[in-house]
Image (tube, coloured by chain):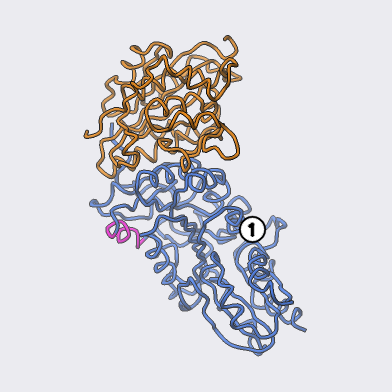
Chain colours: A orange, B blue
Amino acid sequence: MSIPTATTTDTGYAGLAGLMTRMTGDEKHAPAATSTLDVLWVLYDRILRVRPDRPDDPDRDRFLVSKGHGPMALYAVLAAAGFLDPSELDGFAEFGSRLGHHPDRTLVPGVEISSGSLGHGLGLAVGTALGLRAGGRGARTIVLVGDAELDEGSNAEAVQYAGRAGLDGLTAVVIDNGSATHGWPGGIAARFAVEGWATVDADGRDHEELYRALTAPHDGRPLVVVAHVEPKGSH
Amino acid sequence: MAPQLCRIPQSSPIVQPSPIVQSSHPPESPMPASALLTVTHHVPDQRERFYRLLPDLLAADPRAVVLLADIGAGYVDIPAAVADRVINLGIREQLLVSTAGGLALAGMRPIVHTFAPFLVERPYEQLKLDLGHQDAGAVLVSSGGSYDMASAGETHFGSRDVALLDTLDGWTVHVPGHADEAQAQLRAALPGDDRVYVRLAGASNARPYGAGPGATVLRRGSRGTVVAVGPMADRTLDAVDGLDVTVLYLPTVRPFDGAALRATLSEPDVVLVEPYLAATSVPQVSAALSGVRHRVLGLGVGRAELRRYGGPAEHDAAHGLDVTGIRRSVAEFLS
């Protein structure tokens, strides 16, 4: 692979809080925004082969944020990774801003899909991974979903097919903050496992554990990383 | 783990579980059960042509990927060299359109096929978001039309497809009236990155009248214009026999060739004959003639559910889309 991972060292992880505050003011960050922060950091810091100076490189890894809710963490990490000028964060969600409460891929550099309506990213990721495979490209497709988002039945179609197809270029990261109204008895990983996915449960705040999970071997199978964070409403 | 990117098993069903449809014809026949009722045998079937064309389309463009949701999977015969670009997702129509969006984002050109209601109605939000909102394109190819599978009933009727696509931006909509037209439209759609819908019909005209995108003038008259869309052409010509009207043929309805309508206009009385929801293209006629005081009548499939089975010819008659019905409507409108 010719593309190195993104460089996120300008501000470091410690700088993300300041970037978030440019969008949220001094208020406590919304749960949906902070539940993804550590996963996003590890992805951009150590996993994804993407470069802000080559946003359209056909061999780049694709990171699809299906759970478009609470994109402040995404924008903060994109700013830290050099895709966005931090000054742009100040106008977050204003009429003239490119940065809305749900991201638009045609407006924001580094955003691979426009999202907001739940249950679309996994299907788009299946198509992206199939396209990269058909084109002979070795890039990974990584899609971020939420545990409540999995309520949408469209996800089941994608999970089933990806497993049967042995779509090993695909990785799903499920942020599990226990927000699904009727829960997932038996856990989320089991639902992917039965469809033929490799599964890893990880502490969604532990960067080393997340890194190990995201690099877990999964020959011939798609990989799901269930990143457990504190339950919604508990912070 | 064997990947699904492989030759599609010939045992796959051509329709969703629907014994009514499947029992009417031998399963080897790619012709919809109802097509024989309105198509003479020497007129090539549009859907059959599409299936036979697929190996060519795949060989011609390395970006082309065919996506299926079981419908048609048992009928396409794909050479091994391109078989990895024919993907049957099973009966998963949301995934069908989402996957198309993802493939397009990865630089491929998806050709997506199933029956009209399962391609446009069920995954409507996927069309809106996973193609339109992503600024991604695909070639959607439907079959079954409004009621080609008449005996299957309402669940398999697709008369609302073009009207639904009209709520979205950037769609080219082809309604071929002949297999040759469909073939030309499919070939032309492949090199692009845009959103194209090709509506294959069970009924066809006896010969091609032009593959669009512009209108073809079938005849000239001085008492008004009748616009025949796709497979409505032959029956419209029969219906206006002896009436002093212009007949325009449209194998492509979006974009709508309003310029041809204006250029050939005699009396500003226009009748649309469309094989889907009645009056779907009335706004396009109104826009084309916005500077002219005019009258317009939109013929097509009615909104009310008939709750009838039978064959397409009976549904044509019930919706006033047979020769008798079209003639009655046109004569009344112009009198």
Residue at 22% over, 33% down = A1
Q: Is residue A62 magenta?
A: no
Q: For the N terminus of chain B, give its image quadrant.
A: top left
Q: Is residue A227 above or below residue B210?
A: above
- In percent of width and height, residue A49 lies at 30, 30
Considering depth in this image, is A219 or A99 the residue closer to the camera? A99
Q: Is residue A166 visible?
A: no
Q: Is residue B80 left or right of residue A184?
A: left
- Residue position for label 1: B309
Amino acid on which disc 1 is placed:
Tyr
Q: For the C terminus of chain B, give its image quadrant.
A: bottom right
Q: Is residue B245 above or below residue A101?
A: below
Q: Is residue A148 above or below residue B309?
A: above
Considering depth in this image, is B1 or B194 the residue closer to the camera? B194
Q: Is residue B56 magenta?
A: yes
Considering depth in this image, is B203 or A28 the residue closer to the camera? A28
- In percent of width and height, residue B3 lies at 30, 37
Residue A132, image quadrant:
top left
Residue at 38% over, 23% down = A224
Sort mark 1 into few (<14), some (14-19) or many (20+) by Cα contacts within 10 Å: some
Please, what secondary structure does the residue beneath circle 1 have? loop
What residue range appears in magenta?
Answer: B52-60
Which chain does the numbered disc 1 sit on? B
- In percent of width and height, residue B212 lies at 47, 72
Q: Is residue B2 left or right of residue B134?
A: left
| Main SS category, magenta section | helix
Q: Is residue B51 left or right of residue A1?
A: right
